[in-house]
Amino acid sequence: MADPTSQLQSVEDALAALLEGVVPVASQPLACAEAAGRVLADDVAARLDVPAFDNSAMDGYALRAADAGRWLKVSQRIAAGSQAAPLEAGTCARIFTGSELPPGADCVVMQERVERDGDRAKMPDGIPAGDNVRRRGRDVSTGERLLAAGTRLEAAALGQLAGQGITQVKVRRRPRIALLSTGDEIIDPGEALAPGQIYNSNRPMLRRLIERFGGEVVMAKRVADDFDTTCQLLSEAAEQADVVITTGGVSVGEEDHVKAALEKLGQLDLWRLAMRPGKPLALGRLPNASGEARLVGLPGNPVSSYVGAWIYLRPLLGALLGCPALLELPKLRVKADFTTDTKARRHYMRVDLRFLPEGIIASAFADQNSAVLSSCVTANALAVIPAHSSVVPGDIVECLWLTEA
Ligand SMILES: Nc1nc2c(c(=O)[nH]1)N[C@H]1C(S)=C(S)[C@@H](COP(=O)(O)OP(=O)(O)OC[C@H]3O[C@@H](n4cnc5c(N)ncnc54)[C@H](O)[C@@H]3O)O[C@H]1N2
Ligand code: MOO
């Protein structure tokens, strides 16, 4: 009998097939106030120097370094937001953090180091020129690239845009995702559970991951275990979405119709992978009015869907968004505290990375079965255990950190 693992495809081949020919989706102008989490479509150039003028890093006194060590008259007070007058020779200026440095001054001394007597102040010795001065353009110079195309607009990037007075940017539209849940046994929370039925845990789980990866779910339907219905809903989904995701129905059972429907309507690129969980995962294309939608057929077992989403949907959304940070999960090499061995499939084990003073330790969830979703709830990484290998406590394993970008 033929070895059932002999035709398994590698994860690398599957990723290459999945990303082959994928181009970023169209862009749209969007108010910065609405743009958190979105991906920049174009580079953004700085239109201002930041800081816009030389200013003080401390509350204290501005002076010429050459006047250090002397009693100086306090000739002006420069509050933040006001314009400084040139500094008269042999005097100092009372200044505050962020206030403009007066022309002529070249350093600032913090007030704790200064003795004050009426309108005079005693400066400490040996203040180097430039001390406590934040030079114009130190952070950003006009014309330079402020943010690169493909940047995900998170907190610091939104701050950078606001710092330039920018109110609108061009972002990629959110890739549209259709989520089809196959299986006659699947019902939605809120409905009464009959014997043999189970609730649809994959749909809300994948919806959340898709949102974290920058996509939006435009269609979410259940598909009965029936070939014609599967064909009809796959066609409908392909018209509405950039990516059609199915869960379940990709294995070898008589009620598994996704693969056959895909072969009838479009093209099956790849099926059956040398990974655990996720062996029956199917990748393909469905024609639609604008060309084609990609199909990712995730296995029904919740852990297989969850892991498949991190390994395949995250990079696919990265390619559709033109966002390099989403293409690959960050890798860490850390010490394992568990024992395992693998057969013909690479194992993506759900692990908890514990950040201890002595280093990072990967602890594996005890039950790694692909139907046990509890293993994903606290896992913050996947330990990648190569096929035909074994691990004992203390071994170094490669882990993929489960972070959205
Ligand atoms: N004879 C074989 N049987 C199976 C094989 C095989 O190689 N030969 N592979 C097994 C592996 S590995 C996996 S993974 C599963 C995946 O099968 P399907 O993708 O066809 O998924 P289903 O059979 O439809 O469902 C599997 C399992 O998951 C539950 N499920 C499905 N959808 C949901 C949902 N939305 N929410 C919660 N749970 C869901 C479903 O009830 C089943 O228990 O096939 C093995 N079999
Ligand atoms: O490939 Mo399956 O996902 O191991 O249960």
Image (spheres, rainbow, N blue to C red):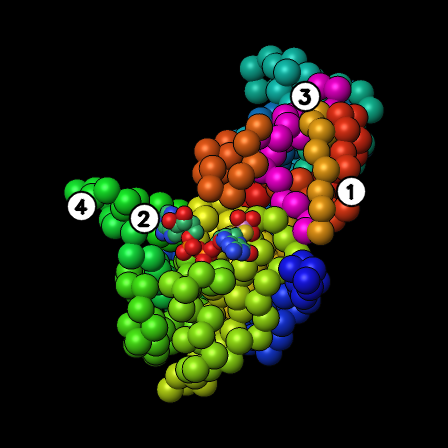
Q: Circle 2 — which element?
A: loop
Report the mark closest to the observer, 2 or 1: 1
Horizontal side, residue 308 vs residue 112: left or right: left
For the N terminus, the image quarter is bottom right
Which of these two is toward me, 50 or 365? 365
Res 95 → quadrant: top right
What's the distance in space between the residues labelled 4 and 2, CA to CA?
Answer: 11 Å
The Cα atoms of the two marked residues, 3 and 4, are separated by 44 Å
State the residue in front, 109 or 318: 318
The answer as to whether callout 4 falls within 8 Å of ligand 1 is no
Amino acid carrying label 3: it is Leu
Sequence order check, earlier mark of 1 and 4 = 4
Q: Which residue has dot 2 on it?
A: 200
Residue 351: in magenta span: yes
Q: Which mark is residue 191?
A: 4
Numbered mark located on residue 67 in the image: none
How far is disc 2 from disc 3 in space, using C-alphas?
37 Å
Q: Residue at x 77, y 46 (%)?
A: 388
Q: Disc 2 or 3, which lies upstream in sequence?
A: 2
- Separation of marks 1 and 4 at Cα, in angstroms: 45 Å
Circle 3 — which element?
strand
* C-alpha separation, residue under disc 2 versus residue under disc 1: 35 Å
Single out the mark in the foreground, 3 or 4: 4
Q: Residue at left 63%, top 53%?
A: 275
Locate residue 76, reporting x and y percent.
55, 32
The amino acid pointed to by label 2 is Asn
Counting the numbered discs, the total is 4
Q: Is residue 281 left or right of residue 244?
A: right
Magenta span: 345-365
| Mark 4 neighbour density, 10 Å: few (under 14) some (14–19) many (20 or more) | few
Q: Which mark is residue 389?
A: 1
Q: Is residue 319 left or right of residue 129?
A: left
